[in-house]
Amino acid sequence: MASRKSAFRAVLATLVVIAAAPLLVILLPLLLPVIAAGAVLSERALARTGCPNCGQAFGRAEVRRAKRVAAAAARGLTRTMMALGLRPRVVTTWRLNCPRCGFAYGYRAGDPPGALTLLGQTPPK
Ligand SMILES: [Zn+2]
């Protein structure tokens, strides 16, 4: 009885996946702009976040720079791991430097804007 029930569940799960695949393809053009808008809004929120040390906002240029540097590091790490035959699982940390006091903070993409980790102090530019 239990195997018949689990077979029914497997068939039902397969049917749900088959039915959902075209729906995802149809909804993808609607979902992509929503995802892109969410990324822009979170980037802006992080840019407005004040430095925990001095209160100065990081600014969009610094957030974009940190994101660009983290993406380049992730690409390099991914290539290296794939060349070694490993499956890469990379979590990038953006290094945000305060334009006023020079303190550096780590930010993981997807975390709330205030979730900053103190990394150290870099000399102000
Ligand atoms: Zn600061």
Image (cartoon, rainbow, N blue to C red):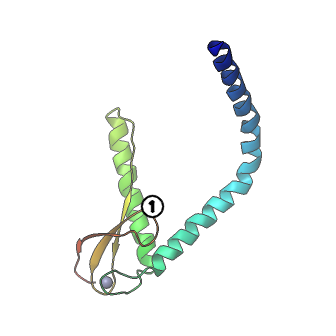
Label 1 C-beta lies within 8 Å of the nearest ligand 1 atom: no
The quadrant where residue 101 appears = bottom left
Relative placement, left or right, of 100 versus 67 is: left
Q: Quadrant of ligand 1?
A: bottom left
The residue singled out by tag 1 in the image is 109
Q: Residues within 10 Å of mark 1 (few under 14, many from 20)?
A: some
Percent coordinates x, y for residue 19 in the rendering: 76, 34
- Is disc 1 placed on a helix, strand or loop? loop
Say which residue appears at 51% left-offset and 75% top-offset: 45
Camera-side residue: 30 or 9? 9
Percent coordinates x, y for residue 102 in the rendering: 27, 81
Say which residue appears at 22% left-offset and 80% top-offset: 123
Relative placement, left or right, of 118 versus 116 is: left
Percent coordinates x, y for residue 121 in the rendering: 22, 76
Relative placement, left or right, of 102 versus 108 is: left
Image vertical order of residue 18 relative to residue 55, above or below: above
> Please, what is the three-letter code of the amino acid marked with disc 1?
Ala
Image vertical order of residue 12 relative to residue 1, above or below: below
Residue 88 visible in rendering: yes
Q: Which part of the image, by quadrant, shows the C terminus?
A: bottom left
The quadrant where residue 115 appears = bottom left
Image vertical order of residue 20 relative to residue 40, above or below: above
Percent coordinates x, y for residue 23 in the rendering: 76, 42
Number of dots carrying numbers = 1
Image vertical order of residue 123 relative to residue 87, above or below: below
Say which residue appears at 73% left-offset and 53% top-offset: 29
Q: Which part of the image, by quadrant, shows the N terminus?
A: top right
